[in-house]
Image (spheres, rainbow, N blue to C red):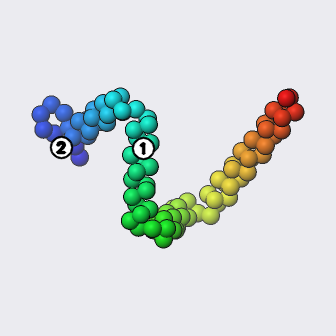
């Protein structure tokens, strides 16, 4: 539910501000603040934190999508790797 104050909702104002920030600072700005945030989380919570949230996320995905989902994405990943290897060999042969 969007709260309004004036002519636009909070979500509209946030979107407008986000677009302006992106236009002003660019991609590198977001990369830098993401890196700083990740570093701070790592320093604050440690390696175990990432293990814990990874397990929670994996369990949730397994419960929602089932084991078949992992088979499908594993197969797709294997196909992509096979394709990339073939492309690399082809480029190497053309040199």
Q: First in sequence: mark 2 or mark 1? A: 2
Instruction: Tell me the quarter of the picture where residue 22 sits.
Output: top left
x, y percent for residue 42: 44, 62
Which residue in the protein does label 2 denote?
3
Disc 2 residue crowd, few under 14, some 14–19, many 20+, Cα 10 Å:
few
Q: Are marks 2 and 1 in contact (CB under 8 Å)?
A: no
Numbered label attached to residue 32 = 1
In percent of the image, x 39 and y 38: which residue is there?
29
Residue 47 drawn at (x, y percent): 49, 67
**Residue 54 located left or right of residue 7:** right
Q: Residue at left 68%, top 58%?
A: 71
Q: Which quadrant of the view contains residue 26?
A: top left
Residue 60 seen in the figure: no
Q: Outermost residue, left direction? A: 6
Q: Secondary structure at mark 2?
A: loop
| Mark 2 and mark 1: Cα distance apart in space | 31 Å
Please tell me which residue lies in front, 75 or 30: 30
Mark 1 lies on a secondary structure that is helix
Tell me if mark 1 has few (under 14), some (14-19) or many (20+) residues whose alpha carbon lies within 10 angstroms of its own.
Answer: few
Which one is in front, 88 or 77?
88
Tell me residue 24's x, y (percent).
Answer: 33, 29
Q: Is residue 40 visible?
A: yes
Asked if residue 5 is positioned above or below residue 47 in the image, the reply reads: above
Judge left or right: residue 75 versus residue 69. Answer: right
Task: For marks 2 and 1, give the one nearer the viewer.
Answer: 1
In the image, taking residue 93 as reference, residue 22 lies left or right, namely left
Residue 85 appears left or right of 7: right
Q: Is residue 71 above or below residue 11?
A: below
Location of residue 16 with respect to 62 vertically, above or below: above
User: Within the image, what quadrant is residue 95 found in?
Assistant: top right
Q: Residue at x 55, y 60 (%)?
A: 65
């Amino acid at each position: 539910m969007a709260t309004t104050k004036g002519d636009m909702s909070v979500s509209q104002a946030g979107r407008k501000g986000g677009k302006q920030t992106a236009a002003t600072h660019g991609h590198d700005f977001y990369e830098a603040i993401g890196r700083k945030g990740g570093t701070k989380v790592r320093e604050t919570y440690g390696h175990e934190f990432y293990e814990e949230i990874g397990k929670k996320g994996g369990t949730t995905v397994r419960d929602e999508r089932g084991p078949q989902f992992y088979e499908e994405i594993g197969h797709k990943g294997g196909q992509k790797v096979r394709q990339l290897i073939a492309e690399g060999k082809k480029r190497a042969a053309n040199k």
